[in-house]
Image (cartoon, helix red, strand yellow):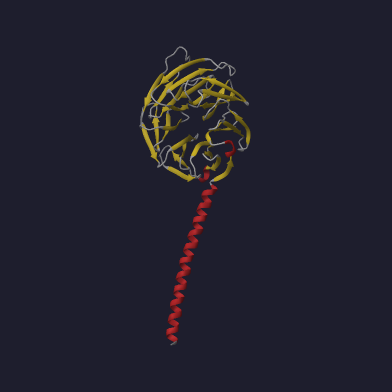
Amino acid sequence: MLKKIFNIFNKNFNQKRLILFLFSLIFLGGFETSQSLAQEQDLIIKKIDLSRYGSPSFIDQSKINKQLVVGFENCNLVILNTSLEPQKNIYLDKCGKLFKSRYGVWNGQSIISSAIYSGNASLVNAGQNFSIPIHKAAVTDSFITNNYLISSSDDGSVQINLLKSLLETTGDSYKIYRSIGVARNLAVVPTNTANTSKFAVSYDSGEIVVLFLPKDISKGKVDSVKFQPIESRINALKFFESGNKLIVGYFTGDLAQIDIDNGQIRKLLQVNSQISSLDISSKNIIAIADDKGYVRIISSITGKVLQEQKISSVGITGVLFMDDKTILATDAAGYLYQCNLTKLGN
């Protein structure tokens, strides 16, 4: 009888040990998962609610004073300092819808150029707003470099306006290229020289044209070279600082690199989402964002994803290198995220 009781107790004891062991695995696994999530959440060192201004469409930083601008679809511009504190909110009249807002330089001054639905380029200088009619269709992108206002349009045209004064609503303008479809994105080679010599425009068809500007646009012919690596809508493109290569992000999730000098095209990777925005650091590290809330950091040399992180439950609308160790991202819900790149990978 005693032996039987001992066997029952021993059996129950083993069952208890097994239950405790399984529970420990579940608990520790849950703890590790929680710890992992905490580490992921730590990638975001700051999250700022800008939803009161609307849904962001673009983010950019001034090379002169390092201020930031976030452009919102509903035509709000929000200026932030380097601590990401909102300093000023400017509403653009007769806008309709805002697509992109970029910092540029005109006569040494930092100017924000916004591409808007009404066919105008809206220029903001120290809080003053100037609207210049430049296209008959919507302006999809615009960029100021020195006295050039370069713009693309819904009607497929690319135009240069020579800005003699911000107070003038009209000036000398030159249509330098046109193709079928929407000319949606511009990329300008970063330069500190007096004239811009090279920029690119992309189309919804997948066509990319690099245009080479003469010193005197009024007299010289604009040379161009055309690429079409993939027949898909292009959502973002940017030059390396050297100006010899372009990084292109597609609606299909493809990320490609184009060598302007020899025409070679290299596919870096493809993600299962729409690439919505991209930026390149001074060390040629690529950041891409997508419509599923992910930000990915990619080596331009190997095409390897150094880190990927879902930072939002909605689409990311803009991504920007604040410096080589920090990226900013905006999402469709109106939040601005600051992420520490030392935690995202080398």
Q: Would residue 257 be found to the left or right of residue 61 on screen?
A: left
Q: Is residue 200 above or below residue 84?
A: above
The reply to whether residue 284 is in sight is no
Q: Residue furthest top?
A: 219
Q: Is residue 137 above or below residue 60?
A: above
Q: Residue at x 51, y 24 (%)?
A: 118
Depth order, front residue of 124/268: 124
Depth order, front residue of 11/283: 11
Q: Residue at x 44, y 74 (%)?
A: 14
Depth order, front residue of 341/73: 73
Q: Is residue 190 above or below residue 14?
A: above
Whole-percent x, y for residue 322 in the image: 55, 36
Q: Residue at x 43, y 81 (%)?
A: 7
The reply to whether residue 20 is in sight is yes
Q: Quadrant of residue 165?
A: top right
Whole-percent x, y for residue 121 in the image: 53, 23
Q: Residue furthest bottom?
A: 1
Whole-percent x, y for residue 139 in the image: 49, 25
